[in-house]
Image: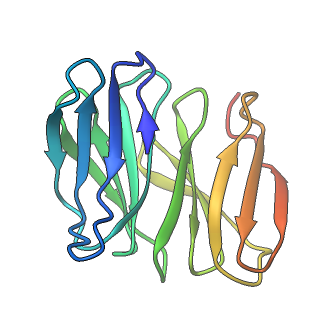
Amino acid sequence: MAIAPDGKTLASKTLARVSEDGTIKIWSYQTNREIATLTGHSNLVYSVAIAPDGKTLASGSSDKTIKIWSYQTNREIATLTGHSNSVTSVAIAPDGKTLANGSEDGTIKIWSLETNRELATLTGHSDKVWSVAIAPDGKTLASGSKDDTIKIWKAGLSE
């Protein structure tokens, strides 16, 4: 789940036990109603993140992809591929220019949201990476893994 910077909308992944339909729902806090449903993933969505400027949403899925969406038009902008297993976590840097993600393949990838290209692959976990978080300074990344470790990376995600 992710809250937009304006505090008025919420993006949630759909994790219904019986459907796992791969959609992302956008909800209004003010009306408690669904505004939009984003479709494009072919399987369960594990994670969503909204850029600090409120213009971009990223989602990670068990279909091994990351989708980048326009949060203003609710349209898909790009699909990022390169993992050999599910994408379990996504985080957008404070400057909104880069994205980090964790995967069940045990790696973390850093992506440019300006070019939609992979910038780096971080290795070091011996099992699935469940969670990634970027520090407010944009220079430090934390990752949590099924290998029972938390790793701190000096990623230099923001200038």
Q: Position of residue 71 (x, y in %)?
A: 28, 32
Asked whether residue 3 is in view, the answer is: yes
| Relative horizontal placement of residue 117, taking residue 30 as reference (left or right) | right
Q: Position of residue 33 (x, y in %)?
A: 17, 31
- In the rendered view of the protein, which quadrant contains the N terminus? top left
- In the rendered view of the protein, which quadrant contains the C terminus? top right
The foreground one among 69 and 35 is 35
Asked whether residue 114 is in view, the answer is: no
Q: Is residue 63 above or below residue 32?
A: below
The foreground one among 112 and 16 is 16
Q: Quadrant of residue 134?
A: top right
| Relative horizontal placement of residue 10, taking residue 142 as reference (left or right) | left
Q: Is residue 126 above or below residue 138?
A: below
Q: Quadrant of residue 40?
A: bottom left
Q: Position of residue 76 (x, y in %)?
A: 21, 47
> What's the residue at 33%, 64% (across, down)?
15
The foreground one among 120 and 67 is 67
> What's the residue at 68%, 32% (across, down)?
158
| Relative horizontal placement of residue 18, taking residue 7 as reference (left or right) | left
Q: Is residue 41 above or below residue 147?
A: above
